[in-house]
Structure formats: structure tokens, C-alpha cells
Amino acid sequence: MSSHSASRPSAESIDAEYRAIELTLLETARGRWFLAEHGRRARRLDSILLEDAIRRLQQSLREPPALLGLLKAEIETLKVALADTRARLMARPTVDESIVPTHAILKAAEDVHEVAWALQANPFDPKGCEEIARHAGKLYAMSQTHAAHSQRTLDATSTLDAAAAKLEGILESVLHELQVDSEI
């Protein structure tokens, strides 16, 4: 094993560092704004690149029929990849994933509820109030992370759906051109 590969961080450590930075950014309004803005710009760039690729495909439709057959195969492969990616995005996360599971949010809400009931018996309990505040803060942070992840997932699936629809249109054009070429 070379010393170069030994110093390279693992995918797990990179992912853990990414998630730590993301959670830190989600703690502030400015951080949440930055993540939303970064996502919007990345989606816009992805859309521009996808539209450019689609434009180039459309321009190549008048190429020889062999190219049309190749385009048909490539588009069908892309459609399958988009559908698979969409399905993975919309799948429920497992407990092992770093996304805050719904049961953790519900547990935090139950903890807050239990402390609130305990405070009814003792109207002035500073430790109880601190505990409620701590649990409420956790609950808020978990729900913000969950909401941000859900929004990113919905945005990504929307982009995938738009790409799939455009690919379907291109595929129809390719199939039409192949039919026209076979009739000639």
C-alpha cells in the first residue's frame, strides 16, 4: 500500500465531516439560507448542463440512422438510471442513515411532554424548565434537519422527473426518425 493512499481520507470520514458541517449550518438562519441558496444554484447549474446535453442530442437527430439507434439505446439507459435514482431518493431512510428518523423526533416530543406534565405538580421547577428547553431545542434541530432533507429530496425528484420527461420527448423523436429512415 502506498503512503499516498494511506493518507487519503475514507469515504466514511468524508461523509461524517460533510454531515457535521451541514448540521452546523442548519443551526443558524444564515446557515440554512446558505444551504438553500447553494442547493438552488446547484440545481440551476444541473438544469443548464442537462438542457445543453438535450440540445446537443436534438441537433444530432439528423445524423445517420446508426447514430439514431445508439441515441435510442443511450436514452433508454438514462431513463432507467433516472427512474432508479428517483426511487432511491423517495425510499424511506433506514435507521442506520444519518437522517434523523421520525421515531427520534417523536421520542423528543414525548420527553418534552413528560417534563411538562411533571411541572404541573410543581409550578416552579427551574431544572424542569431547563429540561423542557433542552428537549425543545433538540426537537427543533431534528425537525429542521428532517425538513431540509425532505425538501432536497423533493427538489431532486422534481428535477429527475423533468429530465425524464425531456428524455421521453427526445426518445419519441428518435423513434420517429428511425421509423422515417426505415421507410426510405
Image (cartoon, rainbow, N blue to C red):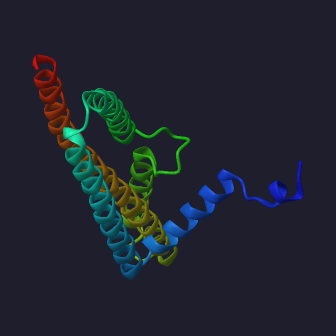
- Residue 38, compared with residue 79, is above or below; it is below
| Camera-side residue of 92 and 8 | 8
Left or right: 181 as drawn, with respect to 29: left
Looking at the picture, how far across and down is residue 63, in whole percent? Answer: 24, 38
Q: Can residue 162 be seen in this view?
A: no
Which part of the image, by quadrant, shows the C terminus? top left
Height in image: 30 above or below 142? below
Residue 156 in picture, x, y percent from top left: 31, 51
The count of marks equals 0
Q: Is residue 105 visible?
A: yes
Nearer the observer, 112 or 29: 29
Q: Residue at x 37, y 73 (%)?
A: 32
Residue lying farthest bottom?
30
Q: Which residue is drawn at 39% across and 49% down?
A: 106
The picture places residue 78, in percent across and down from the top left corner, at: 34, 36
Residue 46: % across, % down: 33, 59
Residue pictured at 34% horizontal, 76% vertical: 33
Q: Which residue lies furthest to the front in this view?
A: 184
Residue at 48% of width from left, 38% of height from top?
A: 94
Res 29 → quadrant: bottom left
Classify residue 52 by image quadrant. Answer: bottom left
146 sits left or right of 178 in the view = right
Where 132 sits versus 49, above or below?
A: below
